[in-house]
Image (cartoon, rainbow, N blue to C red):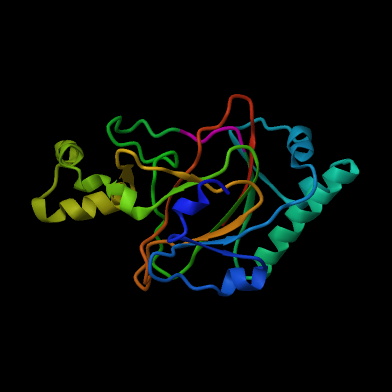
Amino acid sequence: MENISQTENQIQCVTNFQDFVSASFHGNINTICWSRKLVGDFSEIVKQLELNENIAELHPNDLLELQLSEQGQLAREILLKDLKTLKDLGASPTLNLIKFYDRDVSYPFFPTDVYSFHVDRSPIPIDTFLCTYYGESTEILPNSQATQKILVPEIRDELKKIYHGTEEDFESFLSENFFDLHYLAKPKAQPIKLGLGNLYRLAIEHPKSKVLPCLHRAPKEKNGQTRLLLIC
């Protein structure tokens, strides 16, 4: 994991799954990391799977049908185990092959796609789980190093230009269109790459949350390199 010294007050690292799911967010800690060094060749799995779309969900049967080397089999076992473990926990994990995500071009001054630093929101207390096995990894940003975009005067003025309702409903408009979930990195902000193989829990925005939600974004993919990502 890169730049860990800059995130000691944001990320709590653990060494096993039980601690991973039982650790509580508190204070500035809004990210739990199960730090792992995975064995196996995940690139072999990625190269064998044909991707005709920008994003494709992989199911256990897709993985079981592959003819793999010993190292590829080790990687497959990890993927299958992670999926099962999270399902047994009550989560709904998806394993995705990603060329790239669609860009939001609705409002050029305010894209709301996943390449923008954002937080996840839910009406119930759940967490976001994710792990990158191959390709560029997800990035997070300390909350102190970003500003909610709707609070930036220039951006707020532009949003008011596309809004046609009453002044008292403006905040509802921002929420309904997810503008309030996105953040602008401050000058000299230092995003942290989460690295490969580590399993993460990210705090999200919900009514009972005791911590700030984790700011995160999808990385810009390298040309021709597909990502292999588990998320729920």
Question: Which residue sits at x=14%, y=38%?
Answer: 157
| Residue closer to the observer: 104 or 218 | 218
- Residue at image point 75% right, 36% down: 49
Q: Quadrant of residue 205?
A: bottom left
Q: Is residue 175 above or below residue 67?
A: below
In the foreground, 197 or 204: 197
Residue 142 position, x and y percent, is 39, 52
Residue pictured at 83% horizontal, 50% vertical: 74
Asked whether residue 185 is drawn in magenta, I would say no
Does residue 177 appear in the picture of this structure?
A: no
Name the side, left or right, on which 179 lies relative to 94: left
Residue at 50%, 33% (x, y): give it. Answer: 220
33 to 125, vertically: above or below: above
Vertical order, 177 against 86 (above or below):
above
* Any part of residue 135 in sight: yes
Asked if residue 100 is among those painted magenta in the image, a careful observer would answer yes
Name the side, left or right, on which 55 lies relative to 37: left
Q: Position of residue 38 (x, y in %)?
A: 74, 52
Drawn side of residue 94 relative to residue 49, left or right: left
Is residue 152 rendered to the left or right of residue 197?
A: left
Q: Position of residue 90 (x, y in %)?
A: 61, 70
Task: Compare residues 7 and 108 and report the one nearer the observer.
Answer: 7
Q: How many marks?
A: 0
Furthest residue to the top?
Answer: 223
> Which residues, given as a range, are shown in magenta?
98-102
